């Protein structure tokens, strides 16, 4: 086990009994943008639906957007976030946010293309369901993520800054921030939840998360024994609902990567299959598609977060 992993595991163990946010199960109408607005306006009542507006200033008009940040010493020094704002967005109403992390692209230029593809594929669902999609562009030399093993500033520095920027620019519902990642982005998503290196995207701030073609042992449990990885899941003070999409022809599925073995680890730690744990196996390879995002949103929209 690395020194970083040892320190993170010790921190998780020490804080496991600390006060944790609570997962709230949302009524079915919360999955629909129009009904969400009607119910939150007070026309109907009797069901508790948390809403924690960030009260952002409004941001740009609905549609595809590009936001940039400047973090000296990280990549080119200019960081990009490909964004989609649904047509139903109104600054007076807080909306859910899906943070979408692309896979390894091979180069910084390709990383920009990959992030746009992730944004564009999520866009169809976001347009009809009424949530914002943010697809940051990774800053690693190989078009992948500079994770917590890289000295700061790294992409975890960037993700923290990106969340702060989005919450200030748009009225984000902090009780409904969701996280998805593909391949290397999925490895990062696991790390963000299991080890909590970015507060804005840790288990106390993410309502639910999903991974496509990713696994625990590529980053979150890198260098761990089976028992040490299991302990990370066991000791989480809050266990965010989790979805895994995995193709049977994906090299990640079976040996030597064995991502198929991750769901039982979550079950052993207290997640409940077909409830707070969803495992979707499809007949395909190392990929994602728009239909998967419909399924994932239908999982995400069932859950909110209460402090």
Image (cartoon, grey):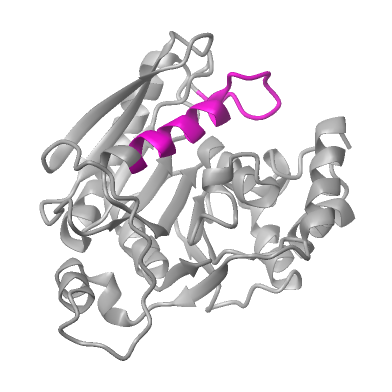
For the magenta stretch, what is the residue range? 144-167
Q: Indicate whether 231 appears above or below 116.
A: below
Q: Quadrant of the N terminus?
A: top right
User: Where's residue 60, x and y in %?
Assistant: 15, 36
Q: Is residue 211 magenta?
A: no
Tell me what residue is drawn at x 74 percent, y 60 percent.
Answer: 233
Tell me what residue is drawn at x 15 percent, y 84 percent.
Answer: 43
Q: Is residue 16 left or right of residue 136?
A: right
Q: Is residue 46 visible?
A: yes
Between 132 and 259, the one lying in front of the other is 132
Between 33 and 246, the one lying in front of the other is 33
The mark tally for this picture is 0
User: Where's residue 121, x and y in %?
Assistant: 27, 45
Name the image quarter holding residue 291. bottom left
Between 71 and 288, the one lying in front of the other is 71
User: Where's residue 255, x and y in %?
Assistant: 72, 48
Q: Is residue 263 left or right of residue 245?
A: right
């Amino acid at each position: 086990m690395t020194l970083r992993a040892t320190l993170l595991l010790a921190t998780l163990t020490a804080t496991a009994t600390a006060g944790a946010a609570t997962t709230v199960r949302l009524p079915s109408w919360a999955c629909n943008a129009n009904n969400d607005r009607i119910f939150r306006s007070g026309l109907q009542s009797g069901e508790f639906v948390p809403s924690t507006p960030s009260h952002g200033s409004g941001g740009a008009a609905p549609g595809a957007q590009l936001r940039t940040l400047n973090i000296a010493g990280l990549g080119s020094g200019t960081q990009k976030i490909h964004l989609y704002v649904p047509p139903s967005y109104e600054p007076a109403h807080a909306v859910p946010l899906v943070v979408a992390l692309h896979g390894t692209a091979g180069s910084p230029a390709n990383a920009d293309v990959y992030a746009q593809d992730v944004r564009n594929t999520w866009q169809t669902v976001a347009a009809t369901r009424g949530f914002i999609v943010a697809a940051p562009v990774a800053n690693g030399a190989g078009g992948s993520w500079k994770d917590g093993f890289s000295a700061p500033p790294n992409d975890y520095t960037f993700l923290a800054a990106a969340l702060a920027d989005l919450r200030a620019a748009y009225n984000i519902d902090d009780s409904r921030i969701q996280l998805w990642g593909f391949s290397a982005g999925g490895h990062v998503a696991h790390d963000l939840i299991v080890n909590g290196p970015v507060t804005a995207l840790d288990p106390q701030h993410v309502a639910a998360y999903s991974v496509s073609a990713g696994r625990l042992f590529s980053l979150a449990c890198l260098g761990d024994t089976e028992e040490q990885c299991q302990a990370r899941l066991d000791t989480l003070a809050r266990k965010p609902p989790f979805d895994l999409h995995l193709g049977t022809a994906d090299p990640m599925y079976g040996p030597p990567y064995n991502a198929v073995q991750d769901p039982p680890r979550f079950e052993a730690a207290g997640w409940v299959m077909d409830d707070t744990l969803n495992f979707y196996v499809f007949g395909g390879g190392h990929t994602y598609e728009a239909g998967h995002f419909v399924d994932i949103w239908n999982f995400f929209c069932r859950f909110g977060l209460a402090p």
